[in-house]
Image (cartoon, grey):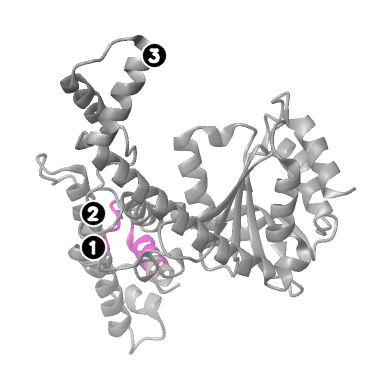
């Protein structure tokens, strides 16, 4: 079936809003479209569902000739992405799957909305989106078909045409966004300053339509009020320049374990969110309770990461000391077995392990297991 016909059928499937399961979206929307783009969902060398990564399973992975994933697709039930909080959570989930994977393009979709992201690009994950398609009943399906062929057709993905087109489009999108921002800033300046030309035009239009001439002060006040809404993103004044790029801070989208305070204070909110989430999940670190209650949330987040990094460094130091002390023994477990219970408990405290109530062999096994885990 031609892609345009497929999209028309998909649009019909979506119109009642009945795809209330992720599986519905995968079976009735995503895979039929992929088939029209040259991906055989019955061939495991083309597509693999529930692709296992180090951070969970991607719903769909599109593979190259060697079985390496080039595109990850995260599917959600219809309408799921209309909620901002759920969208942000799904986006972080998708980028987590891509850590340490050779994927180039990431696709987040609930059937209706198709958002395409570059796996690697400057800026936060949200700034890497290069395309949004809406497969609604009133959508321009010819335009959507053209975009899908450009960025998701199998041969285009395999020969790198898709990634090159995506990179070029992202550059264009960012340039257009900057130009729009410049327009908004200039427009706000005109409104805030009650530009004389604007005042005259508005006064004349009111006089022609309503038959009376409003006081100049009221016109000026009205224009200034509009200026407050001219920049929905916030204050147009540029903030301090950031000394680090997102990619420098997040190589392969994996937070480091040795941030300096200065680096942390320059993180954007969504970037800091990634760091906090990584520490909480990877090292099971809870936010310290000794925060000063007067500190703002941002300051607390910085202190939490610095505290977590300190715990990590202490853990690594203790683990290294155990390994060094065990050199004359056959292995770490043999060394630990040679120690007294009180010495084992001291090591457990150094490593932050809760081992109260364990007998000697249990302490040895727990310590050895954690040292081995740390080495992985």
Q: Is residue 288 above or below residue 261?
A: above
Q: Which residue is mark 1?
A: 241
Q: Which mark is residue 238?
A: 2
* Image-based side of 328 in relation to 241, left or right: right
- Image quadrant containing the C terminus: bottom left
Q: Which residue is mark 3?
A: 209
Q: Is residue 27 above or below residue 243?
A: above
Q: In the rendered structure, which segment of residues is drawn in magenta?
A: 348-369
Q: Closest to the observer: 219 or 184? A: 219
**Residue 315 image point, x, y percent:** 27, 67
Disc 2 to disc 3, how far (Cα)?
40 Å
Q: Which mark is residue 310?
A: none
Residue in the picture at 60% in, 31% down: 79
**Residue 289 image point, x, y percent:** 18, 44
Is label 1 or label 2 in front? 2
Labels 1 & 2 near each other (Cβ < 8 A) = yes
**Residue 60 image point, x, y percent:** 69, 53
Residue in the picture at 80% in, 61% down: 44
Element carrying mark 1: loop
């Amino acid at each position: 079936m031609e892609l345009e016909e497929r999209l028309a059928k998909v649009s019909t499937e979506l119109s009642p809003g009945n795809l209330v399961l992720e599986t519905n979206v995968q079976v009735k929307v995503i895979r039929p479209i992929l088939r029209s783009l040259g991906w055989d969902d019955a061939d495991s060398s083309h597509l693999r569902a529930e692709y296992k990564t180090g951070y969970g399973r991607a719903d769909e992975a599109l593979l190259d000739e060697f079985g390496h994933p080039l595109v990850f697709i995260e599917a959600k039930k219809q309408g799921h992405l209309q909620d901002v909080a759920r969208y942000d959570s799904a986006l972080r989930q998708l980028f987590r799957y891509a850590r340490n994977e050779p994927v180039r393009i990431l696709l987040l979709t609930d059937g209706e909305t198709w958002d395409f992201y570059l796996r690697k690009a400057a800026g936060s994950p949200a700034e890497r989106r290069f395309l949004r398609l809406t497969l609604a009943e009133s959508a321009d399906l010819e335009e959507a078909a053209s975009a899908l062929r450009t960025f998701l057709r199998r041969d285009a993905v395999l020969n790198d045409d898709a990634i090159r087109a995506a990179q070029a489009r992202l550059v264009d999108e960012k340039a257009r966004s900057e130009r729009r921002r410049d327009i908004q800033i200039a427009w706000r300046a005109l409104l805030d300053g009650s530009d004389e030309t604007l005042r005259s035009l508005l006064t004349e239009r009111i006089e022609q339509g309503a038959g009376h001439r409003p006081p100049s002060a009221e016109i000026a006040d009205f224009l200034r009020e509009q200026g407050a809404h001219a920049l929905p993103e916030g204050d147009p004044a540029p903030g301090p320049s950031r000394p680090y790029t997102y990619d420098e801070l997040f190589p392969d989208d994996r937070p480091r374990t040795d941030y300096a305070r200065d680096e942390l204070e320059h993180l954007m909110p969504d970037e800091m969110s990634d760091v906090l989430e990584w520490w909480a999940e990877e090292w099971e670190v809870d936010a310290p309770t000794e925060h000063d209650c007067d500190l703002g949330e941002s300051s607390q987040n910085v202190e939490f990461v610095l505290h977590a990094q300190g715990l990590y460094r202490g853990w690594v130091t203790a683990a290294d000391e155990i390994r060094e002390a065990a050199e004359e023994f056959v292995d770490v477990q043999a060394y630990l077995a040679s120690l007294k219970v009180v010495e084992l408990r001291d090591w457990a405290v150094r490593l932050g392990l809760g081992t109260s109530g364990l007998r000697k062999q249990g302490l040895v096994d727990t310590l050895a297991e954690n040292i081995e885990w740390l080495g992985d």
